[in-house]
Image (cartoon, rainbow, N blue to C red):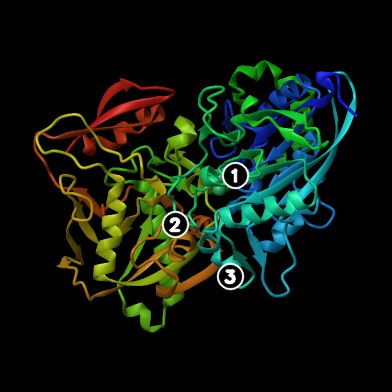
Amino acid sequence: MTISNRTENELQLRILATSDLHATIRGFDYCAEQPLPGRGLEGAAALIGKLRREVQNSLLVDNGDFLQGNPLADLFADPTPGQVHPVIAAMNGLGYDAASLGNHEFNYGLPALRHALAGAGFPTVCANIAMLGTEPPVASPHVILVRTLLSPSGRMQRLRIGLFGLLPPQVLTWDRRNLEGRIAMIDMVEAARASIAALRAQGADLVIALCHSGIGAAEAPPGSENMAGQVAALEGLDAIVAGHSHDVFPRSPDPHDHAVPMVLPGCFGSHVGVIDLRLHQAEDGRWRSLGRASALRVSDHVGFRRLRNSPDAQVVRRASAAAHRATRLAVRHPVGRTEVPLTTHLAALPGNAALAIIAESQAAHVAAALQGTALAQVPLLSAAAPFKFGGRGGASHYTNVAPGPVAIRHVADLYIHPNRIAAVLVTGAELKAWLEKSAEFFLQVKPGLDGQPLLNPDIHASDFDVVHGIDYQIDLSAPHGRRIVGPSHGGRPIDPEQPFVVATNSYRAEGGGDFPGAQPANKVFEDRILVQDVLRGHIERLGVIRAPRHFPFAFTAMPGTSVLFETARSVRAELPWRSDLALEDLGDGAEGLVQLRFRL
Ligand code: MN
Ligand code: MG
């Protein structure tokens, strides 16, 4: 038998992908109580509908981190039987074909995750998790979707499409309390090899990786966090969706620089990844992807706002209407007042009131818990870092609480991660090394030069811990590892042998970010209570938040030296409160940002 018509042995399949939605189904910021332009599954849905209608055959997948990340996710974290999680309801409505798990899916624990996924009308995959003991599975390693595709001439063809999921094995550290003794993690490349082989053995015509991991380096060792580039290089793979890093790839259409087509579709519904596969039926009857003939696109939906009322956007809005209303109501609940702005605009500089109130609440909780124990005699410190600090989230991704009433939405804005309260016992030497690692947040500057960049683009702000309860200087002219000058406690230099209890969060105490001294072996306290709830209770008892009276760190003075950094333009309302910093407004930068000069 020969196939005469060329179009008879060719098929086209479009893969549409979202990643890192973080429960952003509505383009709405519940903390700021305002629209979030260019974000949200509702806007992406309009684009998904348009991209689907352009082709005969398509598949819609999500690449993980869809169930956590905003107050709506916190409110509906653990649906009761029969209740469908609002994010799942929206995904069901849009007809997702499959989803893979991201690391944040584990933030609320395995039972909550099972309850949420129970409502999913699509399979969820994760190949590099092994359940331990009697722990029931949360997802299948891989799945084969049998789909009937239409050829250009209208002939129907059944295809077996294999999908598997991957996520960073570091989740075991980041969510140890939820996962220890319940799951084991497998290296992503190793698990990918096994899934590709298994899917091929089960007769998959196509194999697609849903890899909740950044692209990473070709030479990254096994077990690394960002491995999508290495997975993409594996034999037997036809397409890969990457994620986790919240990045966008490719940045321009059709680069043809990967053997296997790959997309990384941003975050919060900012982008829809598009992979167009051309499939060819060989003489043996098997279908294969003509990999290099594929088109890659990452479509930004900002230009599609006029499609807001498309049927697809309406599906998402209807599915989330009740949850959206309930969340808006819940976050308005009053907690207290603040006399000063609580923001992360200037969290890189000394005297940040937002970090101070978080640190104060953590210390108060740990002090009360340790009362009457031997550890109550050990000096208690508290570490806090800015979580919302621009970056890929842009100018809208800063904590911004104005002076006045503080409601739940402001507490959520101050502390966005579902971390629990914890404390570690460290030595003075470990504490200094902890501070040195935090100080890598800043670039090295040359004394006597004006206008040098301040922030190190390679370090995430959530790894800039400011430790409250001691005094120290950061010398920006010194190289990394030698910048912490004169650390002291109660006016006395810190002895390398001296013990300290550091109040922090579960992520850090479990080794997240790999800080010296912050590791499970040093953990002396943990509680099931979220830091967000600790903070809320603290503000309720306090009634009024005032400006911090004491700043833990200062930069070493360097006459004639200045540094530049960008922050959101909303900082301008705050500048009058921080005249102590003598910041100079150099005018607007890109996309809602402003450039500021700070003299050292
Ligand atoms: Mn994510
Ligand atoms: Mg992630």
Where, quadrant-wise, is the C terminus in this rendering? top left
Q: Is 529 on the left or on the right of 80, as rendered? A: left
Does the residue tagged 3 have its C-beta within 8 Å of any atom of ligand 2? no
Q: Is 178 on the left or on the right of 376, as rendered? A: right
**Can you give x and y, in whole percent of width and height, for residue 142 in the image?**
73, 52
Distance Cα–Cα, label 2 vs label 3: 36 Å
- The residue sitting at the front extreme is 1
Q: Is residue 469 visible?
A: no
Q: Relative to the observer, which residue lies in front, 287 or 344?
A: 287
User: What SS does tag 1 mark?
Assistant: loop
Q: Which residue is mark 2?
A: 542
Could you classify mark 2 by the number of other residues whose Cα lies within 10 Å: few (under 14), some (14-19), or many (20 or more)? some
Pointer 2 with pointer 3, Cβ within 8 A: no
Mark 3 or 1, which is nearer the eye? 3
Residue flagged by tag 2: what amino acid is it? Leu
**Can you give x and y, in whole percent of width and height, for residue 234 in the image?**
59, 46
User: What SS does tag 2 mark?
Assistant: helix
Q: Is 104 on the left or on the right of 493, as rendered? A: right
Mark seen at residue 180: 3
**Can you give x and y, in whole percent of width and height, for residue 96 in the image?**
76, 38
> Residue at position x 83%, y 36% from top?
285
Q: Relative to residue 519, is residue 383 depicted above or below?
A: above
Q: Earlier in the sequence, mark 3 or mark 1?
A: 1
Could you classify mark 1 by the number of other residues whose Cα lies within 10 Å: few (under 14), some (14-19), or many (20 or more)? many
**Can you give x and y, in whole percent of width and height, for residue 99 in the image?**
71, 45
Q: Which residue is mark 1?
A: 70
Residue flagged by tag 1: what amino acid is it? Asn
Distance Cα–Cα, label 3 vs label 1: 25 Å
